[in-house]
Image: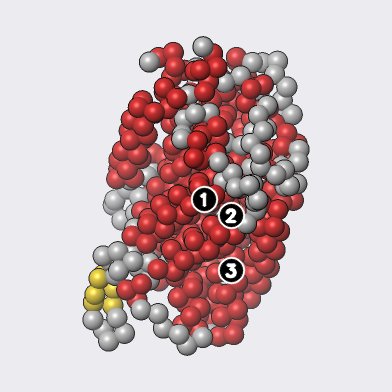
Amino acid sequence: MRRPFWRTKPISQAAAPETGLHRVLGPWQLIALGVGVTVGAGLFSMTGVAAGQYAGPAVTLSFMIAAIACAFAGLCYAELAGMIPEAGSAYTYAYTSMGEGIAWIIGWDLILEYTVNASTVAASWSGYFASLMHEIGISLDPRLLAPTGASIMTSDGQFVRAWFNAPAVFIICAVTCLLMCGTRGSSKINMAIVALKLLIIGSVTVICLPHISAANLHPFIPANTGQFGQFGASGVMRAAGLIFFAYIGFDIVSTAAQDSHNPQRNIPLSVLGSLVLAAVIYAIFSFVIVGVVNYQAMLHDPNPVATVLHSLHIPWFSALITFGIALGYISVIYGLLMGQSRICLSMARDGLLPSLFETLNRRSRTPWSSHIITAVVASILAACLPIDILGKMTSIGTLLAFIIVCFGVMVLRLRQPNAVRRFKTPGGPFLVPILGILSCGTVMLSMDIMTWIRLALWLLVGLGIYAVYGLHRSRLKHTRH
C-alpha cells in the first residue's frame, strides 16, 4: 500500500496532456475569475456573522490576518503554477510532489471545498434575493427561504419549521446552465458581472463613509467573554477562520490552467493579482460596514450590506445595490462550479474518478456530467444546511489545501531543484512555505471541534473510496507497469 500511495507523476507528464477544453482565457479573464469568486459571500454575507459573533469591529483585522496567510500560500501557488501548467490546482501540485495518496486526499478535500462554498454563496444569495423582492413589494413564503427544519417566524407572528431554501437551489441551477453553454461566452458574462460588482463596492463605500460612527468602532476589539473564540484576540482568529474561504478565488484561478492561452505566465500573474485586489477591497469595505452599523446588530445577519443600506434610509439606492449584489453573486458561484468541474476532470483523467467526469459535450466542450452532478449535490446542501456550518467547512478545507501546497513547494525544491520555474517564492525554498504553513495552521487550529470532526469524517470517506476504486484504477499505476 505504501508504494502506490506515494507514487508521483513526473512534471513533464503532468504538463503534457490536453483535456479538449478550449484555451480562451487570458490574464484579464483569469483575474476577473479570481476577483469574481473572492469578492462575494465572504464580504457580502459572512462579514456580519464574523463581526457579530466573534470579532466585533476588529473583523477588519480578521480579513487582514486571513489575507496574510493567503499571501504566503498564494506565492507557493504561483511557483507551482509556473512549473505545472495543468488544470487541477493543489491536487495536481500534490500529485507531482508528494504522491498519489496525498493528491487524492487534497482532491477530495477540494471537492468538499468548492461544492460547499458554492452552497454557502447560494444560501447567502437567497437572503439578498428575498430582500430585493421585498423592496419591490413581493413577499416570499419564509418557509422557502431557510434551511430545512429551521425555526422561522411568519408574518402573523407564529413560529414554524422551514421547508428548504428554494432561491439557493434556483441560482445554482441557473449558473450551471450558463457554464454548460461554453467557456468563451460565459467568461465574457462573468467579466461584465465582476465590473458591476466592483462599481457597487465603490458606490457603497463612497455613500457610507460620511455615516461611519466612532461609537460603533469602540472598543475595536471587544473584551473576551471568558470563552475561547468569543471576542478578544481568540475571537479575531476565530473570525479569520470563518471568513478564510473568502480568499478562495486565487485557488480557483489555478484550476483553469487548461483554459488559458499561456498558463505558465498567466496563472502566476493572475493568482497574485486577484489576491492583492481582494485583500484591499475586503479591508476597506469591512471597516465601512462595522462603522455604519453596530456589530451587535449583525449577530446572525447573513445580509449585512442590506442592513447597512436600510440604516441609511435611501430606498432607491438600497434597492439598486441589493439588485447589483444579487447579480454579482453569479460570478462567485460561476467560478466555484467551474473550478469543481476542473478538479473532477483532472482526477478522472488520472483514473482516480470514473471517466464520466472527464466526458466533454461535443458542442460546448464543457464537462456536462460533472456540472450536473455538482449542481445536484450543491443544491441539496444549500437547501438544507445553515450558512455558518457551510462557511466553516469551506474554510477548513481551503486551509488544508493551502498547507499541502506549501509543503509541495519545499518537496519539489529538494527533489527537483533544476526544474524550470517561471516564478520562485522569495527568501529561498523554505521561508515562504514555512510561514504559509504556520499562518494557515494557526487559523486552522482556532476553528471549533465540530468543524474538525466533519472534515475528518469527509477525509475518511474519501480514503475508503480511494482504497476501493482509485488505488486500482489509477492510470499512473498501469503506465508504470
- Residue at 30%, 69% (x, y): give it: 163
Query: Which residue matches tag 1?
Result: 371
> Dot 3: within a 10 Å radius of its alpha carbon, few (fewer than 14), some, or many (20 or more) residues?
some
Q: Nearer the viewer, residue 290 or 402?
A: 402
Q: Nearer the viewer, residue 339 or 392?
A: 339
For marks 3 and 2, give the CA distance.
19 Å
Q: Quadrant of residue 285?
A: bottom right
Q: Nearer the viewer, residue 248 or 106?
A: 106
Q: Earlier in the sequence, mark 1 or mark 2?
A: 2
Quarter holding the N terminus?
A: top left
What mark, if any, has residue 180 been given in the picture?
2
Q: Quadrant of residue 320?
A: bottom right
Query: Which residue matches tag 3?
Result: 327
Can residue 112 be seen at all in this image of the molecule? yes
Q: Earlier in the sequence, mark 3 or mark 2?
A: 2
Q: Which mark lies nearer to you, 3 or 2?
A: 2
Q: Are marks 1 and 2 in contact (CB under 8 Å)?
A: yes
Residue 40 point in image, percent of width and height: 55, 59
Looking at the picture, does residue 60 appear above or below residue 254? below
Q: Amino acid at mark 1?
A: His
For marks 1 and 2, give the CA distance.
7 Å
Q: Amino acid at mark 2?
A: Met
Q: Secondary structure at mark 2?
A: helix
Residue 458 point in image, percent of width and height: 35, 39
Can residue 98 be seen at all in this image of the molecule? no
Residue 457 point in image, percent of width and height: 31, 38
Looking at the picture, does residue 310 appear above or below residue 301? below
Q: Quadrant of residue 168?
A: bottom left
- Residue at 41%, 83% (x, y): give it: 139
